[in-house]
Amino acid sequence: MFVVGLTGDVGAGKSTLAGAWRALGAHVIDADAVAKRQWLKPEIREKAASRWGSDMLRDEGVNFAKIAEIAFADETEYRYMINLVHPGTRVDLTREATSLRGWIVAEIQLLFEAGRHDWIDYVVYATAPEKSRLQRNRVRGWGDGEIKRRERFLLDSARKQEMADLVMNNDSTLESWGERAERTGRMFLAMSSVREVVTFCASFAEAEKLAHILVENRLVACANIEEVKSCYRWRRRVETSTEWSLLCKTTEAAMRKAIQCIKANHSYELPAITARDICGADAATLRWVVESCE
């Protein structure tokens, strides 16, 4: 599992990034949609009606336009709204993200304000010139002062950019932004495909030779050799022997060739090769593996 947290300035093009990455195979979670579902909970609806009046309620949830009008006009009401829906949103986001596998994108507007989740491996911050942001949000029917009104209770954009792992500045054409989204997405997709391949050798010399072949041919990024004591069934007999395990880090794209290479250069009739997903890893390590392999 590799999770990219996507956040950024209002109107900077986050939805375009999320859409492009979904098309490449990412599981996209929209925190705004998860937050809106909180308003279906009876206890949330009751508290909202008690605070702002029953006219805020609708058959499904609340009158979001009215809530926005109240919350973005007064910091006390804004904080109340956040504290009302944030705890459940955070729990539901965590439940959904940790139930998935592969490459996950969590689009979270308040990622830094709410506290970065420990299951997020990498944060992308989307920004854009103010003129471009204003133009994009006019399509939503927002006046030119609406962005500042909605962002005035948030952390400073410059500070959040410092906290992100990657800042993407949407300062060109929509076509250019889409191309950058695809390039970045393909890197993330490869990072989510990092695997560990394991085999066992009869001697240290054989393990070392195999390691060099695999690394030199860019089939794996690294290979770790360790002496082990093995007990196994072979040809109807239980055997014990000293072996050397070879643990390699590679990508899904290179893994098949790496396995073929091991088979071609191994002394065993059955090299007992296995492969496994990596459930969590440092993003810089994943990128190094991708860049080191074919």
Image (cartoon, grey):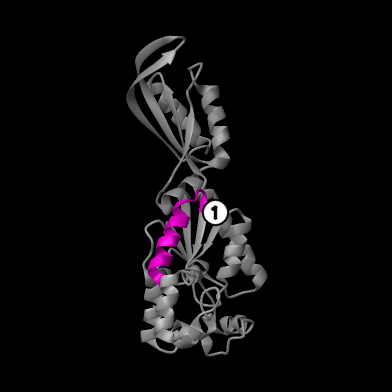
Can residue 111 be seen by looking at this rendering?
yes
Using the image as rendered, state which of residue 188 and residue 288 is in the foreground: 188
Q: Count up the numbered dots.
A: 1
Q: Which residue is mark 1?
A: 187
On screen, residue 38 versus residue 144, left or right, reads: left
Q: Is 247 drawn above or below residue 232 in the view shown? A: below
Q: Is 250 drawn above or below residue 103 in the view shown? A: above
* Residue 112 spot, x, y in % from top left: 39, 70
Q: Which residues are magenta?
A: 85-103
- Magenta stretch encompasses residue 102: yes
* Residue 221 spot, x, y in % from top left: 46, 41
Q: Mark 1: give few (<14), some (14-19) or many (20+) Cα within 10 Å.
A: some
Q: Residue at x 54, y 49 (%)?
A: 190
Q: Is 240 drawn above or below residue 55 in the view shown? A: above
Can residue 148 be seen by looking at this rendering?
no
Find the residue positioned furthest to the right. 175
Tell me the quarter of the image containing the C terminus: top right
Using the image as rendered, state which of residue 223 and residue 35 is in the foreground: 35
Q: Please, what is the dominant secondary structure of the magenta stretch?
A: helix
**Kind of element beneath mark 1:** helix
Q: Residue at x 56, y 55 (%)?
A: 26
* Residue 187 spot, x, y in % from top left: 54, 54
Q: Amino acid at mark 1?
A: Met
- Magenta stretch encompasses residue 258: no
Q: Quadrant of residue 248?
A: top left
Q: Is 164 drawn above or below residue 276 in the view shown? A: below
